[in-house]
Image (cartoon, coloured by chain):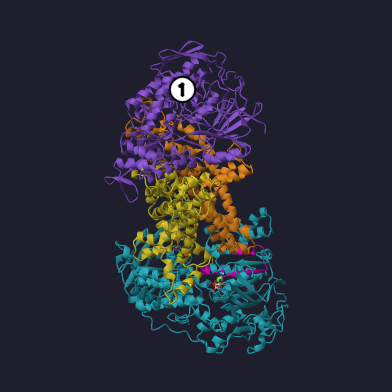
Amino acid sequence: SSGSGSADGAGAAGGGAPVDGGTLRFAAEVEPDCLDPAVSPADVTGVVDRNVFDSLVRLDSAGTFHPWLATSWEVSPDGLTYTFHLRTDVLFHDGTKLDAAAVKATLEHAVDPATKSLYAGGLLEGFAGADAPDPATAVIRLTKPRAALLQALSTPYLGIQSPKSLADNAADLCRKPVGSGPFSFVSWEKSTSVTLKRNPGYAWAPEGAAHTGAAHLEKLVFQIVPEESVRQGQLRSGQIEIAGNAAPARIADLKGTKGFQVLQQEAPGQVYGLFLNPVAGVLADERVRTALARSLQLDALVKSVYHDTRHRAQGPLGPGTVFYDKSVEGVLGYDPAGAGKLLDEAGWTGRDADGYRTKDGKRLTVVWPTSAYLARDNRDLLAQGVQADAKKAGIELQYLNQDPGTFAKTAVGGTADVLGFSFVRPEADILRHYFGSASTADKGGSNLFRISDPQLDGWLDQGASSSDPAVRGRAYAQAQKYVVDHVLEIPLYVPVTALGASSRVHGVGFDAAAFPQFYDAWLAAR
Amino acid sequence: MKGLPPPAGGLALLRHWVVRRLALAVVVVLGAASAAFAGLWLAPGDPVQLIVGSHEVTPEVAARVRDDLGLDEPLVVQYGRFLGRLLSGDLGHSYQASRPVADVLGDQAAATVELALAGFLLALLGAVLLAVATAGRRPWLRRASSAVELVLGSTPAFWAGIVLLTLFSFRWQLFPAVDGGGLDGLVLPAVTLALPMLGVFAQVLRESMERSLEEPYALSARARGSGETALRLRHSLRHTLVPLLTLSGWTVGSLLSGAVVVETVFSRQGIGRITASAISARDLPVVTGVVVVSAVVFTVVNLLVDVGYAIADPRLKESLR
Amino acid sequence: MSVPALVPSRTPRTARPAVAALATLRRIPLGPLLAWAVLVLLAVAALTPGLLAPQPPNAVDPVNALAPPGSEHLLGTDQLGRDVYSRLVHGTRDSLVVGLGATGLALGAGALLGVLAATARAVVDEVLMRLTDILLAFPGLLLALLVIALLGPGTGHATLAIGLSMLPGFVRLARAQALLVGRADYVHHAVGFGQPRWTARLRHVVPNALPPLVVFATLSIAGAVIAGASLSFLGLGPQPPDPEWGAMLAEGRGQFEDAWALALGPGVAVLLTAAALTVVGRDLQRRLEGRHGHGRR
Amino acid sequence: MAVAEEAARPAAGSPADPSGGSPADPSGGPTGGPLAGAPAESFTDAKPEAEPEPGPAGEPPVLVVENLRVGFARGGDVVRGVGFTLRPGECLAVVGESGSGKSVTARTLLGLTGPGAAVRADRLELDGVDLTGLDERGWRGLRGRRVGLVLQDALVSLDPLRRIGTEVTEVLANHRLVPAARRPARAVELLAEAGVPEPEVRARQYPHELSGGQRQRALIASAVAADPAVLVADEPTTALDVTVQARILDLLAERKAAGAALLLISHDLSVVARLADRIAVMFGGAFVEEGPAAQVLAAPAHPYTRELLAAVPGRHPRGTRLSVRSPELPPPGTPAPADAGCRYAPHCPLAEDACRTRPPEPVRLAGDRVARCRRLDRPWPAPRPAAGPPATGPSATDSGTVVLTAEGLVKSYRRPDGSTHRAVRGVSLRLRAGEVLGVLGESGSGKSTVALMAIGRLRPDAGTVTLLGEPWPGPARGADLRRVQLVQQDTLSAFDPRWTVERLVGEALGAAGRRAARRRREEIAGRLRLVGLGPELLGRRPRELSGGQRQRVAIARALAAEPEVLVCDEPVSALDVSVQAQVLDLLAEVRERTGVSVLFISHDLGVIRHSSDRVLVMKDGEVVEEGEVEEVFARPAHPYTRQLLAALPG
Ligand SMILES: Nc1ncnc2c1ncn2[C@@H]1O[C@H](COP(=O)(O)OP(=O)(O)OP(=O)(O)O)[C@@H](O)[C@H]1O
Ligand SMILES: Nc1ncnc2c1ncn2[C@@H]1O[C@H](COP(=O)(O)OP(=O)(O)OP(=O)(O)O)[C@@H](O)[C@H]1O
Ligand SMILES: [Mg+2]
Ligand SMILES: [Mg+2]
């Protein structure tokens, strides 16, 4: 991982002794659709809910799990049973005591079809049930071994909810989250802000936090400010303390401005990449896929589009992901001559009036549908750069904006040649979501081209089920290598969580998923 | 129009007319809602797909969603149900927010109404001031003002919003960038919404004011010793009401689309943003809810406008047919 | 409006055409002259953009991204190093198609429907106006989606969608206007001369109801271009990398500090177009109505 | 005024005195410019010693004007050296042709000449206070309080969106003369004083709810509300029918009797005869003749005055031309070619070469009169008979076939409150071939409604119209409608303002035929020639035509449709007498040439008497009397007709 500012848990250096009190205002780009972590898949929900909900375990960015609500846990040898020993001193914000029943209720709520969970339910893949043999012991049973379960349990999406709230509040969980976290929910002004306040009785900070006891901040306000320039203006005029999603161009500015800092962390998981259709269409020919990849000057492009604030991705996983494999580096380098040769070999030898290659009179056209909601983070600009490079190689890359409905149809229908996605998750298992043959769209996965490669499936399943890190590491290394070797994906850049912040802000850390953490945060006096 | 008899019994006529228009309003509302239903049905994309987005969802969940929404039934049944519910005043449940649409809109409506009203009144006030100050005055003044109005009318709302924010919020810190619930948070959004309207209003106002200043009654008023500004305020201003009313009817429509941008830039809640996201997500109940509400609003506003004509210009009483 | 016919025909054929042309020029006041010049430039930019901007509009050059305005790049470059000036010029055609096309559509159809509503029988009027109300209550975005669904994506269809969403305002205005004009005696006289009613309306009511509509239209052009940008996200309208002012506006919105020309350029282009059309429109109106001076007696 | 003082002196002014304009009076001399050396540009110049001294009434003048010149940015001066004085209780009437500068003079007295106007005067004094250097504030203090103005366009001079009461007392509010609370009551008093019936009701009504005459009274009430010393009334009776007109004149007489100085402007000599002490005749921006009212009317001296009197219809037998001007002469309002000569010369049947090159000098006549003409001694040409004997005399019509018949026409209008108003209640008429049938009646009696039914634009509720024995309009409608054409009072609204004369007339010729453009143009030019207009007008738009020209174009257009019947609805009531005379002559001529039958509607008895063969008198939607025109005028049978004839001024 890289980045200026702080990483993982540790307070910013030189901040002096933490000060208690104050309100930290954080301007987020998007609004949570629902604050019930079991329902919403949104990142922002995770960021907000992290403060309201505690998890059983905590994952640090090195990939190590630490006790939190569970003081310890065991996995059965067959990997099908997880037993968690819970703290007994934990109170939810509504005064309910944490016990195994709460864990059971939370997990059952997540997988209950009535919840219509869009993410948490999926995290619990293979969930067979939960038991509460005694108040301090929670048991989770699985139908098949799942190495990623702990990571799933460490996310805010499976944060433990008050069973009382789950029972009494069923209809209103979205607007009234009740957890045991360092901050409790106060209010949600639709489209405007979510306000949290300090939980004064908080005494169950996870292992590895910079302090124990109640949070430093008195209040935590998430303002919803969709416009980047407005967030920046607010930050610079002191109307907020942290601006989420700082645009690349602004990051350099802020770094050079006194009184401000940039807090950033590269995100783990699936990098932003172009998924190529190896099943149908012109890209079914691996030579053409390779040629496309080799004709892109990604180093220069990523540098200019992101003002030097993002790294070019080398493989499907970000370097900060556990089991990231270095062998992918340099595989898909810029080589226009090689690309040309490959295309010649593949039979795309003709040229038409616009300079595009043709075969049998047909132009070498590659269709890349997209939709407005995917265009965040300068991605449409990057696309135009990719488009221009492809054109130099004689490939017509059509970047087609579509309305969300049409796009969903094309994407799910598998008729596209190229699709661009990223998925932040500190777990290499994410690869299975994109490349596993069991992860096609109809099964809820994102293997939209219906890639079915037994070899790949083998590695991915092994990685998912083995509890031996060494085995998993080997399997994922091979899978990553396979993806770049066969150009199933052209990795473009590694997403970054970048926050513009006032230099009064201290102690904001990032969790394994590069989500900002506010438990240790504090505000220096003006 | 010649010697009109005194408007005895005009009130009865007015009542009759209003009742008839309101009856027609129901037709308009049903028509608009049906059009929205058809529109969403024809628009590409499966609502379920759009609701679940690109997230991992098991087919069971999808089927469940589909069933919940009644989307697996034949279209005719869906439409029949839709109309039935609409007629009984039930706008349904939002797919996205899984709450009653009436609640969703109810939460948001106040903010939008507040914004729209403030914007409209500001535009009106600004336009009146501008028109009174420039109508029939020195040519350079009129030209300058009409240039300013053109610029205002052609400036994208998000530009105007960001410029205003930069100056009044970020630099001079006079108003908060994000509405904190107080009146000061309404100022900048309302101004942003008002500026383009002001451009249009001022042009229309000045034009009709100048026309009225050339009328003999204006000369007559001057001959009675009326000052130029008094003349504009007391006489000409009323003559601008009819064209202004026509414009107002139109404005209501543009207010909603303007509100989307303003609400986004200023992080306000409101119908504008809800609509945009509901359409993208094919949230049929919310979209039809918005359509129904705006159809009602437009009908009422147009009704008021037509009644307003008769009030603004007593000669137009006969136009209430 | 037969815009271009006016200028050449005013130049008398004399032995010394240059002198005559100068004399003609001097008779046109400066404002309209400038406005005409802008329109001519726009026309050239739309028809043969290469003439005004030889640099290719889509040539990516990451090394020179966000270059400031200068001799190499008149208005600097964007984040991909593309020449902003060139993109503006090459974007003229699509932008004008959307901006002017949609406005023209709304104006033309609005005038016809409004006049029809005002002059036809009460039933027709009622039906037309209620349909207009429905259209007014129909969100523009949904309308655009419908157009895509029925006709598919494309610049022309974007124009149609925007034009349709602008239509109700024009219909209302035209109707109000036509109600005033339609009572005019000259319409009755025309019928008295044996003309069919609809010809009389087309010849007399429509042109006389038009002037305020035209003012309204010029004020709507910018809005149409901006709306075009919001639709290109849906796949309506020009697609990247093809330049278009609305899309450029959207791209440049956060770039005031880094590249003011990128942020301001497209907005200024829209504004100039609207301003030039306004001035020329007023000038033409004055000429056509034979009024001189400021239209004040 | 200066001239008025002549009465006290021997009328021995020497008309030939070349030093009439000598700068003996340092303050009154010409202020320079091209006219500096010219003799006698204004009456006062001719008599530099004239000082505002107590006149016969013994009172000092309230208003003194000397050598007033007004010019607009475009074109030269439109008022060129006007001078007069006005004493309390005195009435000076200014008559003159349209565009001669009457209204400009009137507005100048209140500093309301308009933007871009250059006003110069040797003296402009109110109550001895110089007004020439007054700023806008100063003027505002005078307007309404010291000088009241009743505007020319009475029907539109009240703000249609304000209640009558507010308008009437606006002057009191402006000058803070009466506190707001007292104003409504005052408004009622003022309206009552002005003779408005039911003043309490009217004060709360809007102008459109009042009849024309009532509006005119309200306007006068508003002008006199602050009891100004000078009341300027610009055409206060134009477009009103005779009975109403008489009442308005009575009202003004009351004000005069109450001591107000009255400047009455009109183009109609007969109207002012009742009220004026003195009459000034204006032409081309100057007073061409001035003198005591009775004398000017009885023995007009200046050729233009003589033309004016001659043009009054009803004073001359039918079948004579009213207008002495030939159609070839430039229409009124055309600026004279040069400043050098007499402005009237181009129109004057007596003009000689010298008239065109040298300005006329004031000639003092017996009985305190001044006229500005070098040909005063020449006799005025006798009224010409119309060219050739009338094709259809009253006797001829007896045997003529009936072209248009109306039988028991009934038409009701719905009032806004839903009740119906029966505008026409069983009107029958017969129009014979080649005849002119006059329709006379007060405002609102249903004349226009009958006309609209006659041309087929309005369907009668009951009754029938037949054209040459066939139902009218025929089932075909469309092109059929061409057979009956309308010439209406308000030509400006009868023409599409954007169209040129060529297109306007061409429209009536019919779109079909696809004749070659040039031949069509020639045909249109021919149509214009028929009404005495040259082809140079082809490219003009309605607004660029004078009222007389417009009315001619309207007639040409109606005739271009080659109708069998021409319906003229008040075709001349908006025109000044001399132009009206030309139009009436034209109509007579057209009838001779084409044999078209004419239904002629007017509220002006003189006009009807002059132009019609038979007359129908309407009241409240019914025909109350019908007969040969001379017969009806000589022996009116119905009391209403008698009342009408009795109200005839002059
Ligand atoms: N504001 C103005 N600007 C330019 N010319 C004007 C203006 N007002 C009047 N005139 C011109 O001055 C001349 C005199 O006009 P005025 O209105 O005084 O005529 P009038 O004698 O009152 O005629 P009428 O009997 O038709 O009312 C006309 O030729 C008219 O065109
Ligand atoms: N379109 C209409 N709607 C309602 N009432 C009308 C309409 N036209 C005319 N009237 C009424 O019918 C009556 C007759 O009107 P008409 O115009 O025929 O009178 P007129 O004799 O021509 O009067 P004037 O001399 O003022 O022109 C009037 O009382 C008038 O108010
Ligand atoms: Mg006048
Ligand atoms: Mg009439």
Residue B245 visible in the snapshot: yes
Q: Quadrant of residue A446?
A: top left
Magenta stretch: includes residue D223: yes
Chain in orange on the image: B
Nearest the eye: B218 or D208: B218
Report the label total: 1
Q: Amino acid at mark 1?
A: Ala
A10 w.r.t. B6: above or below: above
**What tint does the image give chain D?**
cyan
Quarter of the figure that contains the N terminus of chain D: bottom right
**What tint does the image give chain C?**
yellow
Q: Residue at x 36, y 80 (%)?
A: D391
Quarter of the figure that contains the C terminus of chain D: bottom right
Q: Quadrant of residue D72?
A: bottom right
Q: Residue under circle 1? A: A152
D462 w.r.t. A149: above or below: below
Magenta stretch: includes residue C216: no
B191 w.r.t. B235: above or below: above
Query: In the rendering, at what x and y percent does residue D598 appear?
Result: 38, 72
Q: Magenta part of the protein: which range?
A: D220-243
Q: Quadrant of residue D557?
A: bottom left
How many neighbours does mark 1 have within 10 angstroms: few (below 14), some (14-19), or many (20 or more)?
Answer: many
D298 w.r.t. A481: above or below: below
Residue B300 visible in the snapshot: no
Ligand 2 within 8 Å of disc 1? The answer is: no
Q: Quadrant of ligand 1?
A: bottom right
Query: In the rendering, at what x and y percent does residue A365 appear?
Result: 33, 43
Q: Residue at x 62, y 70 (%)?
A: D108
Query: In the rendering, at what x and y percent does residue D403 appear?
Result: 33, 70
Element at badge 1?
helix
